[in-house]
Image (cartoon, rainbow, N blue to C red):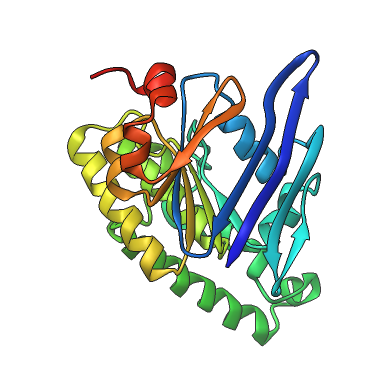
Amino acid sequence: MIVLQTKNLTRNFGGLAAVSNVSLEIKKNELVGLIGPNGAGKTTLFNLLTGVYEPSEGTIELLVDGNLKSIGGLKPYTITNFGIGRTFQNIRLFKELTVLDNIKVGMNQNINYGVLTAIFRFPKYYSEEKRVHEEALKLLEVVNLVDKKDELAKNLPYGEQRKLEIARALATNPRVLFLDEPAAGMNPIETQELTDLIRKIKDDFNLTIILIEHDMSLVMNVCERIYVLDYGKLIASGDPDSIKNNKKVIEAYLGED
């Protein structure tokens, strides 16, 4: 079952096509890699799929309530409500908030009470706050940060900040999760922990995951299919073995070694 697809997706900046005629099909519960040289258009593609940019041409469709719905050009908060979550290449935590409060912010759109209930502290307010608190703690357990729930996010080591950002993305209750270079800046031990975490959340949360990453060991170990971009164009797609042996990919990105 296709959960996300693009057809001839294009984004121009002036006279430059950052993404050009890209067509993708992402199936339910797949773990798909998106690779390519720096400047190939990978993050621009993520920004199109998550509503940061509007397409110049082409379509984006997401499975919503059993039907593919056009989401190109919709606001990011609307796309989030439809079930897409993401992390960012540059970590974007609320650094002055606690670890726990970062998770709660991610759950904001799923809180089931209105303004008056919050102002007058009706019973519904307390029951919902209790539910949010408990669910936030469960997410911190998934990423092994529950013991740091009261620390400020800015005080976490780099690798743990990456994990917190993933947990916050999970807090939006996504069906499709975009991870933009989650292993960037990590040492080998942290990268292995991240690899295990990605596998775990895919299975435990029944997710479709799309991953941008330059660490080829991580990509080849976890991804079932891989798309390759170069100069904004899709030059190859397939399973990890076929990508490793693809001449165009070797010339553009992987290298002979």
- Identify which residue, 197 or 129, lies in the foreground: 197
Q: Is residue 149 above or below residue 37?
A: below
Residue 61 location, quadrant:
bottom right
Residue 219 visible at all: no
Q: Position of residue 241 (x, y in %)?
A: 31, 41
Query: Which image quarter: residue 213?
Result: top left
Vertical position of residue 223 compared to residue 119: above or below: above
In which quadrant will I find the N terminus?
Answer: bottom right
Task: Spot the residue most to the top.
Answer: 15
Indicate whether 68 appears above or below 44.
below
Q: Nearer the viewer, residue 125 or 110?
A: 110
Image x and y of residue 148, in percent: 31, 54
Q: Does residue 137 lie above or below 252 as drawn?
A: below
Q: Is residue 165 visible?
A: yes
Q: Position of residue 194 (x, y in %)?
A: 29, 47
Which quadrant does the C terminus fall into?
top left
Question: As drawn, is 82 to the left or to the right of 214?
Answer: right
Position of 100 with respect to 112 (left or right) is left
* Residue 97 vs residue 74, the one in the foreground: 74
Query: Looking at this rendering, what residue extends furthest in the left direction?
Result: 189
Task: Report whether 42 appears left or right of 182.
Answer: right
Q: Residue furthest bottom?
A: 123
Q: Which residue occupies the foreground of this view, 138 or 247?
A: 247
- Residue that appears at 26% across and 40% down: 191
Is residue 221 shown left or right of residue 85? Answer: left
Residue 68 in percent (x, y) is at: 73, 64
Q: How many marks?
A: 0
